[in-house]
Image: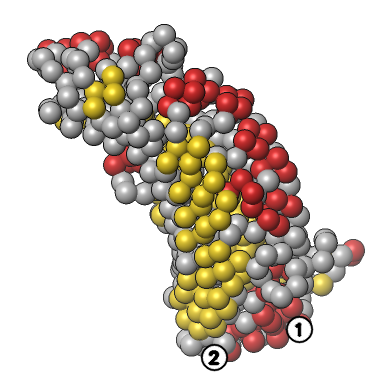
């Protein structure tokens, strides 16, 4: 369940952010979204413990590219010839009869690494997990790392990587085993058009807060197992519906493309993603109506299309009220000058916890269909042209802790029932 505190944090910030369990800031993740985990079953070595020579050479080459030595690695104190004992390295025996001890995981997140990222790490051909996040690695991202057949998790987030993602040629089919790819919070500038063609198993892709320009690659539609897509806070442009066919991404659960320059209409093909829970398209250049087929998104709990040029508030609300799990609905800065629909047109949103329809210059009254949203915690209808009185029944919303009706044309007294709200932390009801 989404708490009131979480809802307030989402709406009060300039961007929709949350804090993950690791403490890193990223885009909103609902609790229902499962994380990608990899069970490597690291078995203790039997007999002599020594990593494969080829793996030691590959790791040494990586270390030699760094500006500072890693404790316990070549060039630092307490150095061991056995790379399986090096900091952040986990090994596993592969093959029959125990097999050779190979590097299966390399995790040096937050170790203060500086330097370039070499492609020689791709020689670790039994590697399953590579996590170099929260460092200061710079330069290009070697495309070889995207083509490793057994690598499942690649996390290079929060570094200073630059250039493009992907090589001149996409990986051949079946060449990559990547399931989780995170390059967020770097300085990447472009995506190769065919970069996703060689990533058929990918479930989670995050490239938020880079400097990406250009259109969304159509090859992203080939990732039929994709569940989580986050490319928010970049400078992507082009027609969203034409560049990406969501009917091929039917397993999608979270879509974060806010804070870009995407144009066109909201793609009706999104309605094919029946497991979709989170849609964040905030602050783009989208226009046109909300497709009526969005009513089919029964799992959807978070929908933000604020700061666009969407039209048709009445049909939009009629479609979205069918999403019975919808808890967060943000439509701010759309529907300019339209009429706020009344109770005859809209039944209401019984699961709603946060509603933002601000800065739309809407005419009419405070909508009576809000009475169905008894669990509402945050209500923002500011900067419209609403008339009439503030309805006393708002005081019956026991969970309401923030209400903003400012900069409208409301008249009359403020209902005493609002003053009795025990959870009310802030309000703006004037003019």
Residue at the right extreme of this rendering: 96
Picture layout, residue 415 above or below residue 140: above
Between the residue at mark 2 and the residue at mark 1, the CA separation in whole angstroms equals 18 Å
Instruction: Name which residue lies at 18% across and 14% down.
Output: 389
Instruction: Name which residue lies at 24% across and 27% down.
Output: 385
Residue at the front extreme of this rendering: 337
Disc marking residue 87: none
In terms of depth relative to the viewer, which is nearer, 354 or 345?
345
Residue 168, given in percent of the width and then of the height, sits at 71, 75
In terms of depth relative to the viewer, which is nearer, 269 or 114?
269
Instruction: Name which residue lies at 9% across and 15% down.
Output: 413
Q: Badge 1 is on which residue?
A: 53
Where residue 343 sits, quadrant-wise, is top left
Residue 323, given in percent of the width and then of the height, sits at 53, 23
Q: Badge 2 is on which residue?
A: 75
Location of the N terminus by quadrant is top left
Location of the C terminus by quadrant is top left
Left or right of residue 27, residue 197 in this image? right
In terms of depth relative to the viewer, which is nearer, 190 or 316?
316
Tell me the colour scheme of the image. Answer: secondary structure
For label 1, count other residues whose C-alpha is less than 10 Å away and answer few (under 14), some (14-19) or many (20+).
Answer: some
Residue 384, given in percent of the width and then of the height, sits at 25, 30
Residue 160 in view, yes or no = yes
Picture layout, residue 397 above or below residue 149: above
In what element is the residue under mark 1? helix
Where residue 192 sits, quadrant-wise, is bottom right
Number of numbered labels in the structure image: 2
Mark toward the start of the polypeptide (2 vs 1): 1
Residue 150 in view, yes or no = no
Picture layout, residue 121 above or below residue 421: below
Where residue 367 sits, quadrant-wise, is top left
């Amino acid at each position: 369940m989404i708490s009131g505190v979480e809802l307030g944090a989402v709406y009060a910030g300039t961007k929709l952010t949350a804090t993950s369990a690791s403490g890193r800031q990223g885009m909103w993740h609902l609790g229902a979204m499962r994380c990608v985990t990899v069970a490597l079953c690291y078995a203790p070595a039997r007999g002599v413990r020594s990593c494969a020579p080829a793996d030691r050479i590959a790791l040494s080459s990586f270390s030699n590219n760094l500006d500072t030595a890693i404790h316990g690695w070549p060039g630092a104190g307490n150095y061991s010839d056995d790379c399986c004992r090096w900091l952040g390295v986990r090994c596993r025996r592969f093959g029959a009869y125990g097999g050779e001890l190979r590097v299966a995981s390399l995790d040096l997140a937050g170790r203060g690494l500086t330097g370039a990222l070499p492609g020689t790490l791709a020689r670790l051909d039994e590697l399953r997990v590579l996590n170099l996040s929260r460092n200061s690695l710079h330069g290009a991202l070697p495309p070889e790392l995207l083509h490793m057949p057994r690598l499942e998790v690649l996390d290079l987030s929060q570094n200073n990587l630059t250039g493009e993602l992907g090589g001149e040629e996409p990986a051949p089919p079946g060449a990559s085993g990547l399931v989780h790819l995170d390059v967020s919070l770097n300085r990447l500038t472009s995506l190769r058009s065919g970069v996703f063609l060689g990533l058929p198993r990918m479930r989670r892709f995050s490239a938020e807060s880079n400097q990406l320009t250009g259109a969304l690659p159509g090859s992203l539609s080939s990732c039929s197992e994709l569940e989580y897509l986050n490319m928010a806070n970049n400078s992507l442009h082009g027609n969203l519906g034409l560049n990406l066919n969501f009917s091929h991404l039917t397993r999608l659960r979270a879509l974060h493309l806010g804070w870009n320059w995407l144009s066109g209409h909201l793609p009706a093909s999104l309605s094919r993603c029946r497991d979709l829970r989170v849609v964040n398209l905030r602050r783009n250049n989208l226009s046109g109506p909300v497709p009526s087929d969005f009513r089919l998104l029964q799992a959807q709990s978070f929908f933000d299309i604020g700061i666009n040029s969407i039209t048709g508030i009445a049909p939009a609300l009629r479609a979205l009220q069918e999403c019975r799990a919808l808890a967060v609905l943000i439509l701010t800065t759309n529907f300019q000058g339209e009429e706020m629909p009344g109770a005859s047109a809209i039944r209401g949103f019984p699961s709603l916890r946060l509603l933002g329809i601000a800065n739309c210059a809407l005419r009419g009254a405070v909508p009576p269909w809000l009475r169905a949203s008894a669990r509402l915690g945050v209500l923002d209808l500011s900067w419209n042209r609403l008339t009439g009185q503030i309805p006393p029944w708002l005081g019956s919303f026991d969970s309401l802790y923030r209400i903003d009706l400012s900069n409208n044309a409301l008249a009359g007294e403020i209902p005493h029932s609002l003053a009795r709200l025990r959870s009310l932390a802030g309000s703006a009801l004037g003019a």
